[in-house]
Amino acid sequence: MKKMVFVLSREDSEAATRCFLFAKIAHESGHDVDVFLIDGGVHWADTARDGSERCQTGDCVDDHLAYLVDKRIPVGVCLPCAKGRDLPESRFHPNMRLAKGKELIEMAASGSAFNF
């Protein structure tokens, strides 16, 4: 199976829903999956964030993020992006941690990268 990294850079729920859905599908298919949140995407690391807004397809962030948390899929959260938004690691989901850009580059270099 392949190594895949899913990068979410947007705050909108539709992009986050798709990113987390495809990460979930890849993991369920046996692939080695990482997720990395950058720019506005870091807001999805916050456990207080409401992920119940339904997309046109009828699903929502909560439908897929719960799987990633439950399966402990590693999620890197851009350190300067989170700090610039006053988002402390103490508010992250348990499978998420602050990470530097170098880690994203290493993840992408070892497999396929998908951007949302």
Image (spheres, grey):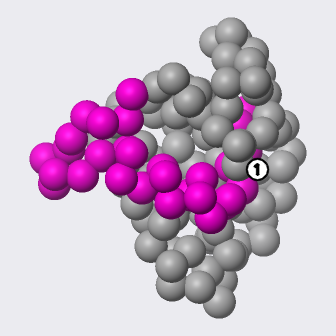
Is 68 colored magenta in this rendering? yes
Quarter of the figure that contains the N terminus: bottom right
Residue at figure coordinates x 13%, y 47% from the top left = 56
Q: Secondary structure at mark 1?
A: helix
Q: Residue furthest bottom?
A: 1
Snapshot quadrant of residue 33: bottom right
Kindly identify the amino acid type of the residue bearing the numbered disc 1: Leu
Residue at figure coordinates x 49%, y 52% from the top left = 66
Residue 38 visible somewhere in the drawing: no
Residue 116 vertical placement versus 71 (above, below): above
Residue underneath mark 1? 104
Residue at figure coordinates x 68%, y 59% from the top left = 72
Residue 14 vertical placement versus 65 (above, below): above
Image coordinates for residue 84, horizontal then vertical, percent = 70, 12
Residue 44 vertical placement versus 61 (above, below): above
Is 36 colored magenta in this rendering? no
Residue 114 vertical placement versus 12 (above, below): below
Snapshot quadrant of residue 50: top left
Image coordinates for residue 29, horizontal then vertical, percent = 51, 84
Image coordinates for residue 94, horizontal then vertical, percent = 71, 43
Total tally of numbered discs in the picture: 1
Q: Which residues are magenta?
A: 50-78
Q: Residue furthest front?
A: 70
Residue 113 visible somewhere in the drawing: yes
Towards the viewer: 112 or 59: 59
Q: Is residue 54 left or right of residue 36?
A: left
The local crowd at label 1, few if under 14, some if 14 to 19, many if 20 or more residues have their Cα within 10 Å, is many
Image coordinates for residue 80, horizontal then vertical, percent = 77, 22
Residue at figure coordinates x 38%, y 45% from the top left = 61
